[in-house]
Image (cartoon, rainbow, N blue to C red):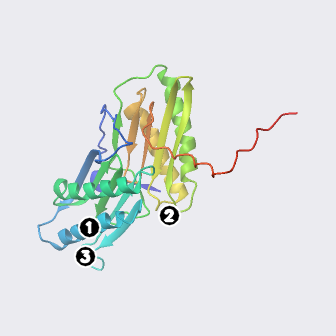
Amino acid sequence: MITSFNPFSLSIVFLSILSFLNLTTPATANYLFHLCANSTFSANSLYQTGINSLLSSLSSNATRNLEFYNTTTNQNTSNPVFGLYLCRGDVTSEVCRGCVAEATKDLTTRCSRERIAVIWYDECMIRYSNESIFSTVIVSPRGSLSNTQNITNQEQFNKLVNTSMTSLASQASDVPIGVKKFGTNEVNITAFQTLYNLVQCTPDLSSTECNSCLQTAINSLPICCGGKQGGRVLFPSCNVRYELYSFYNTPEAPSPTPGLQPPPPLQLL
């Protein structure tokens, strides 16, 4: 069941923002936006100590080459802090570490006194809350970014985005809890034009929960980005994106084993 992130009952939508980011050489993480809310707390409080400990734990665990990590600080107290990070499924462990390190530092400045926060970078996402956020589909607050360029044959293009991304969401989510839920695909529009799609969920969701989250995000694309050459929707629990250019890293094909020759092509008799 999809639940809302109550402190942000109103969706925060960012429209017509250029998203032509160089995602293949992320020496520096690319900040998108952040949101923080709920009641504030005083400096040097137990909750402040918990946040500091949480962010330190997230950053240090990113050095273990973990793409996803969640933890709780201030357990067994009246001020627990629940937090997690998620790196984009195609980035290297080095890029993941760098993004988490930068995002944790950024949060201490941008959300210095709020009990709930989420920050999105192109390469990672970090969030924390005073309520448990684990294994729960949360679709608010939400953000959307769209390419400013329009596409021709908008109705046909929007249908192609929906069908191809829906298929990708079904495939990427069809794995057990704890397994990476990430996928990309490429669809030829014409001989000279290709549609690139990406979907991702936090791996603590079940297959059904992930697919439901992704479908909600996909259904939001026409609202923010219909007829645009590119767009994305970001939820705390999942995200989707499409473009007419390759914006993600594709795995390299394995090198052939030395000394082995490829088999001859099959002959049709």
Which residue is the site of mark 1? 56
| Residue tagged 3 | 78
Say which amino acid is labelled 2: Gly
Q: Residues within 10 Å of mark 3 (few under 14, many from 20)?
A: few
- First in residue order: circle 1 vs circle 2: 1
Which dot, 3 or 1, sits closer to the camera?
Answer: 1
8 left or right of 41 in image: right
**What amino acid is labelled 1 in the image?**
Ser
Q: Nearer the viewer, residue 49 or 79?
A: 49
Whole-percent x, y for residue 256 in the image = 62, 49
The residue pinned by badge 2 equals 178
The residues tagged by marks 1 and 2 sit, at their Cα atoms, a distance apart of 23 Å
Is 7 on the left or on the right of 238, as rendered? left
Q: Is residue 94 left or right of residue 53?
A: right
Percent position (x, y) of residue 57?
A: 30, 69
Q: Nearer the viewer, mark 3 or mark 2?
A: 2
Q: CA distance from mark 3 to mark 1?
A: 21 Å
Q: Residue furthest right?
A: 269
Residue at 50%, 54% (x, y): give it.
Answer: 181
Structural distance between the alpha carbons of marks 3 and 2: 28 Å
| Type of amino acid at the residue the image marks with label 3 | Ser
Q: Residue furthest left?
A: 43
Element under disc 1 = helix
